[in-house]
Each structure stands twice: as C-alpha cells, then as structure tokens.
Amino acid sequence: MNANITDLGESTPVYEKKEIIYSSTMGVCIVSDLTKLSADKNTPPIPYYVLKSYYDRTHVAYIPIENHEVELRPLMDEEAAESAFEDLKQAYEEDRDHVPDELMVGELAYIMKLNPEELKIKAGAPKPDEEDET
C-alpha cells in the first residue's frame, strides 16, 4: 500500500518528518513519516502524513496532506502557552472540579516541559490524594 515517497507529486507537505505539531484529534504529535496510500489498485495514491501521538506512541493517524478536515498546526508559542496556563489557573480557582481540554493540557505540558498531570496540579487541580478527601 505504501508507495515510494521520494516524489509526493503536486502535494507539498507543510510539515516535515520528525516535526512536533498539534492535531485537533490527537493533541501533540510527531510527524513520523510522509507516505502515499491508495484505496485500491485503480486509485492513484494520495500523500499522507503519518502522525504518532507524543504521549501514546501506539496511537497513529494517517492524515491526507491536502484536503484534510483535521486541524494541524504548529505548537503554540511560549507567550500563548503562558496565557493559556493563566486561563487554566483561573478556571481552577473558580471551580476546583474544572475539567480541562486534555489536548490543550498536553500541548501546554509539552511546552512547559511537564507531564500533563503535573501541569494540572501546578494550575490548581486537586492532587489525586486530595480528591479522595472531598
């Protein structure tokens, strides 16, 4: 099913192999490969990104390079991450039981060099042992 990727035809990938990006379905992910896939022998192959979740390397997605519906973008910059982290802290101050968007938490954690659970605790989420006491 894979074709030689040396020539992707008219498709020009925006992201390169080994680049870390954000996917609206997986969160932080690694572009592990660029490949061509075809539904059958009569259909010309289409270039795809092969994405692996940064946090769960067994989670793989094949996203067409062109005409895809999944949002793919570079990770937010440090300034945007700081702002999003402050918003998360505010949400926990207003409601200790706040349930954040886990994909956003993963992106912030990656940028801030924390694991997602550490990031939530740093933002004000109850520690796992504190949840049992409530």
Image (cartoon, rainbow, N blue to C red):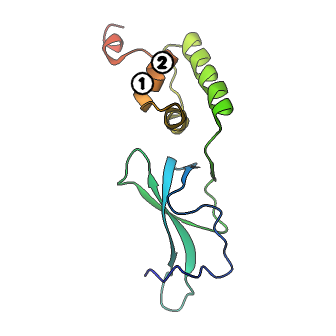
Say which of 7 and 102 sits in front.
7
Q: x%, y% of residue 56?
A: 37, 47
Look at the numbered disc 1 and give the secondary structure of its residue. helix
Mark 2 residue type = Lys
Seen at 39% across and 54% down, the residue is: 59
Q: Is residue 49 left or right of residue 121?
A: right
Q: Are marks 2 and 1 in contact (CB under 8 Å)?
A: yes
Q: x%, y% of residue 37?
A: 50, 78
Can residue 26 be seen from the camera position used here?
no
Q: Quadrant of the C terminus?
A: top left
Depicted 5 relative to depicted 98: above or below: below
Q: Quadrant of residue 104?
A: top right
Q: Quadrant of the N terminus?
A: bottom left
Q: Residues within 10 Å of mark 2 (few under 14, many from 20)?
A: some
Q: Residues within 10 Å of mark 1 (few under 14, many from 20)?
A: some
Q: x%, y% of residue 84?
A: 63, 28
The label shown at residue 118 is 1
Q: Residue furthest bottom?
A: 42
Q: x%, y% of residue 11?
A: 66, 75
Seen at 52% across and 63% down, the residue is: 17
Depicted 49 relative to depicted 102: above or below: below
Residue underneath mark 2: 122
Mark 1 residue type = Glu
Seen at 53% across and 28% down, the residue is: 100
Look at the numbered disc 2 and give the secondary structure of its residue. helix
Q: Is residue 87 left or right of residue 43?
A: right
The label shown at residue 52 is none
